[in-house]
Image: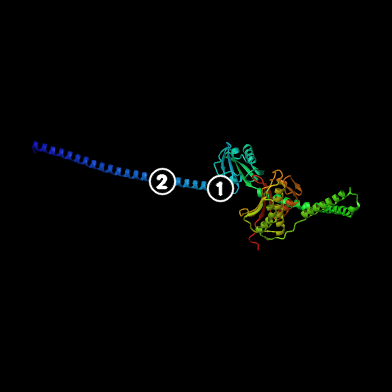
Amino acid sequence: MTRSGYLLLGLTAIVGMLAAVLAFAVLRLFAAARAAAKAEKTEGTETAFMAAAMEDAVQRLRDQERAMKARAEASERLSSEIIASMTSGLLVVSEDRHVRSLNPAGRKMLALPEADWSGEFREVLVGAAPLADVVEECLTSARPIVRRTIALKGAGAAHLGVTASPIRDETGRAHGAMCLFSDLSEIVELEDQLRLKDSLARLGELTAGIAHEFRNGLATIHGYARLLDLERLPADFRPYVQGIRDETEALGQVVTNFLNFARPTELALAPVDMAAIADRAAEEIRGEARSRGGDVNVRGEFVPVDGDEVLLRQAFSNLCRNALEACADARIKPHITIEGVRDEAQGVLRVSVIDNGPGINETIAPRMFRPFVTTKARGTGLGLALVQKIIVTHNGRVAAQPETGGGARFVVTLPLRDPTLP
């Protein structure tokens, strides 16, 4: 083989090797490209999966947040409904002496209008100083106050039962006070009514024998005075004997009336038409009232009650007579009204006898219904005391109130008739 042949063979071998290297490089390049594409595809899938997982987690957190918010709102709404529905008053005072909460029942008992009562608690309770003192004591001592009874003046409840407790945090530090109070006015009135019944019973037991002996002595004196012949006495002595007769007769009548008052009352209970009672009491004094330039009216709603018709008629007759005499003594034209109000919520009928007379002194009002109490404006004798005895025997109450602008209002409260009774 010639030199040229060897040279061509060498060049051919070199070219083949170069082609092989180039082919290998191209194959490696394609392999690397496929691997890169595959890796890129895998990485994109993982990124999408991570994004989806993150979005799902965020959505779950949002759902949990909405659920927690809904539960919190529902819990707050339930707490507000419970506080608003409580029949007892609830007062919450913070550490800085400001009111944080006062429920509707509490506002009603304290005669406060519906408003923002978030000020300093003594300013809010300016009309209920005893209650403010209880809250102050609880805040100062950080000790609970249990079952304390306080009396209030003015509008709202007259007697409150109060319980106050300090509000403590997780460490036990007191940072406010919570006060629960309820209206005890009806309970106190019932207790007073029971005490009055017991007092009347004791009065009858203690005085009946004494009054009988006193009446016997008066009868003896009166009898001997009647035996004296005035015509046979000197003229100077006749007025004295006549005075003895008159006084013994008057005292005998007083003792008889007192015995009737002290005697235990026996009721003949039956349905009583209170409208007829009011009409009859008004008719008894209407003629005399008109002769003095006045009048007597009956208005309002009257419903039957269980009671003794004779005794109730006597009670309202005494009240109307007392009103007429008060106006007559003060030389006032009598305008008297008998008003009936049915209170289904309290289960009572309130019958008021209203006059335009000289009124009632507030210091005398609590004693108006005691036997033989007499004032310059109203001589009561046993008339009003008998009214109270009759009404109390019927499980009712009677109170005297001065009217605005003059006059008086006597309010009789009687329980409504039980509809289940025949």
Task: Say which label, 1 or 2, has the lower sequence index.
Answer: 2
Left of 318 or right of it: where is 167?
left
Please tell me whether residue 114 is drawn above or below residue 96 in the rendered image: below
Q: Position of residue 165 (x, y in %)?
A: 62, 42
Left of 7 or right of it: where is 313?
right
Number of numbered discs present?
A: 2
Please tell me whether residue 339 is drawn above or below residue 102 in the rendered image: below
Q: Position of residue 330 (x, y in %)?
A: 71, 46
Residue at mark 2: 59
Residue 84: numbered disc: 1
Quick one: quadrant of the N terminus?
Answer: top left
- Nearer mark to the viewer, of 1 and 2: 1
The quadrant where residue 92 appears: top right
Q: Position of residue 298 (x, y in %)?
A: 64, 54
Q: Nearer the viewer, residue 189 or 251?
A: 251
Please tell me whether residue 253 is drawn above or below residue 25 in the rendered image: below
Left of 47 or right of it: where is 302?
right
Q: Nearer the viewer, residue 30 or 403?
A: 403
Quick one: quadrant of the C terminus?
Answer: bottom right
The quadrant where residue 342 appears: bottom right
SS for callout 2: helix
Does residue 260 appear in this view? Answer: yes
